[in-house]
Amino acid sequence: AQSVSQHNHHVILSEAASLELGCNYSYGGTVNLFWYVQYPGQHLQLLLKYFSGDPLVKGIKGFEAEFIKSKFSFNLRKPSVQWSDTAEYFCAAADRGSTLGRLYFGRGTQLTVWP
Amino acid sequence: SAVISQKPSRDICQRGTSLTIQCQVDSQVTMMFWYRQQPGQSLTLIATANQGSEATYESGFVIDKFPISRPNLTFSTLTVSNMSPEDSSIYLCSVGRSANYNEQFFGPGTRLTVL
């Protein structure tokens, strides 16, 4: 079965600092990869996704993620964080060949940005 | 993206009782999913609900404990039966959008506390 691991449970940064959140998945086949974000008091929402093509994908609010197949990784980055980026971030993976829609989530990383 | 609502948003229940959570979508969708997020844990898929067929449960989840209904293409319910404190969790429904349903949109969740 697939699994997704996120290396950091809680990251604390000052505004304007650069961000990188690690995500690794374990699955031998082709995968679709996602980052979801949950702002305080809000729904879980899709930040960005990778299905195929350019391994560097850009999402909303200046976030990007890079798929490195050889490392089974899909790290999330942002060059300069803002206080409003304070949220919980979830990495997720799915078997691209499956029609069952099963998503596997990491445990999440709580990001706190100090103004 | 789909607009998804859940009722109730939160509840406090007594041990041994049951609670039914409703999920309503603003458009017709084929597949709906139910997840559980226990405190400090990741999202775990409980079951997939296709309209017109029996729900498909993940390992560790059974129909007697989590019966699901899917009467039409915009609505689903999840019942948490014979509750115990270990069932205290956030329960989320989601819907799949893309052809293989990997890309999912989530409801706001139902926060359940069992005393």
Image (cartoon, coloured by chain):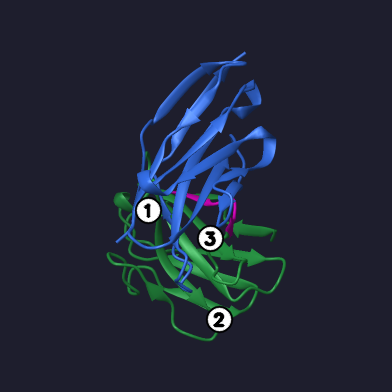
Type of residue at label 1?
A: Gln
**Residue A44 is covered by the magenta coloring:** no
* Rendered location of residue A102, percent (x, y): 44, 65
Report the Cα–Cα distance between label 1 and label 2: 31 Å
Q: Name the residue under label 2.
A: B51
Type of residue at label 3?
A: Cys
Residue drawn at point x = 36 percent, y = 34 percent: A7
Name which quarter of the figure residue B17 lies in: bottom left
Residue drawn at point x = 71 percent, y = 70 percent: B27
Of tags 1 and 2, the one toward the viewer is 2
**What chain does badge 2 belong to?**
B
In the rendered view, does A33 fall on the left or right side of B59?
right
Q: Which residues are the magenta region?
A: B104-112
Residue drawn at point x = 70 percent, y = 58 percent: B1
Give the colour in which the image draws chain B: green
- The numbered disc on residue B14 is 1
Give the colour in which the image draws chain A: blue
- Between A1 and B106, the one lying in front of the other is A1
Q: Is residue A12 shown to the viewer in this render?
A: yes
Q: Name the residue under label 3.
A: B93
**What chain does badge 3 belong to?**
B
Give above or below for A81 relative to A62: above
- Asked if marks 1 and 2 fall on the same chain, the answer is yes
